[in-house]
Image: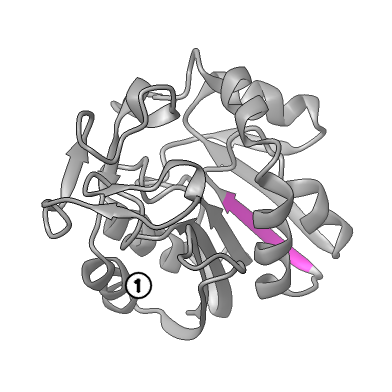
Amino acid sequence: MGRVARYDGYAKWYDRVNAEQAPHTTRLAARLLGDGPGRLLDVGCGGGIHDQVFAERGWSVLGVDISDDQLRLARDRGVEVVKADAHELPFGDGSFAAAVSIFTHTDVDDFPGVLREVVRILAPGGGFVYVGAHPCFVGPHSEFVRAEGVPKLHPGYRTTGRYSEAPGISPDGIRARMGATHLPLGPFLQAFLEAGFTLERLEEPGEREYPYILGLRCRR
């Protein structure tokens, strides 16, 4: 694979940290995805914390991730998984009816490349749901601790790439441990269009004044 499994060594810690937020993102992703049946690929499945809900909605779920530690947690949850790099998915063209990915664009090195792979493995008309950090208010440029209050913005929003030190990094958060990749909103959305997706729905969920996450549904 040749790429670093950044969550090895942090999987159990992240699973605990993510436990409070996970039900909200799972509900959002499941609602955008809709019901099965069909083969569903969870790209960057992590510990598989979302996948039982997708299975309950009629999907045959397969998770893929590059982290051995994350995959171990997913297997413990009963998720069928394959170790693979999302930039090079080991599946044939048109193998899946649908795909989902949650909070991955800030972890991978080449998100547009991942999206091209997702398009490739989807059957014609297949749906793809993505839920991730809102590029405008989460990133190196934005202090938005626990997504509370009003974000404090700094220079750096338009700078694309990985970062490990920036005003927007909380010293006790996951990004302080392993860094993140930032894409401004324009390049982020354009990556879906250039991969070949048709955007069907875009949501900024939550009742707070400023959204922390963004969810979208698109179709091959």
Give the amino acid at mark 1.
Phe
Residue shown at the point (37%, 45%) measured from the top left: 88
Q: Main secondary structure of the magenta part?
A: strand
Q: Position of residue 171 (x, y in %)?
A: 36, 23
The picture quadrant where one finds residue 192 is bottom left
Front residue of 115/168: it is: 168
Residue in the foreground of this view, choosing between 176 and 154: 154
Q: Is residue 154 magenta?
A: no
Image quadrant of residue 137?
Answer: bottom left
Q: Residues within 10 Å of mark 1 (few under 14, many from 20)?
A: many
Which residue is depicted at the point 41% across and 38% down?
Answer: 85
Q: Is residue 34 left or right of residue 199?
A: right
Please state which of residues 135 and 30 is positioned toward the viewer in this rendering: 135
Disc 1 marks which residue? 192
SS at mark 1 in the image: helix
At 21% from the left edge and 49% from the top edge, which residue is drawn? 141
What stretch of residues is rendered in magenta? 38-42
Where does the image place residue 114, in percent across and percent down from the top left? 36, 54
Q: Residue furthest front?
A: 149
Q: Please tell me which residue lies in front, 208 or 106.
A: 208
Residue drawn at (59%, 19%) of the image: 13
Residue 93 percent coordinates (x, y): 48, 64
Asked if 167 appears above or below 60 in the picture, the reply is above
Pinpoint residue 3: horizontal percent, then vertical percent.
31, 28
Choose top left, top right, bottom left or bottom right for residue 96. bottom right
The magenta stretch spans residue 39: yes
Q: Quadrant of the N terminus?
A: top left
Drawn side of residue 210 relative to residue 110, left or right: right
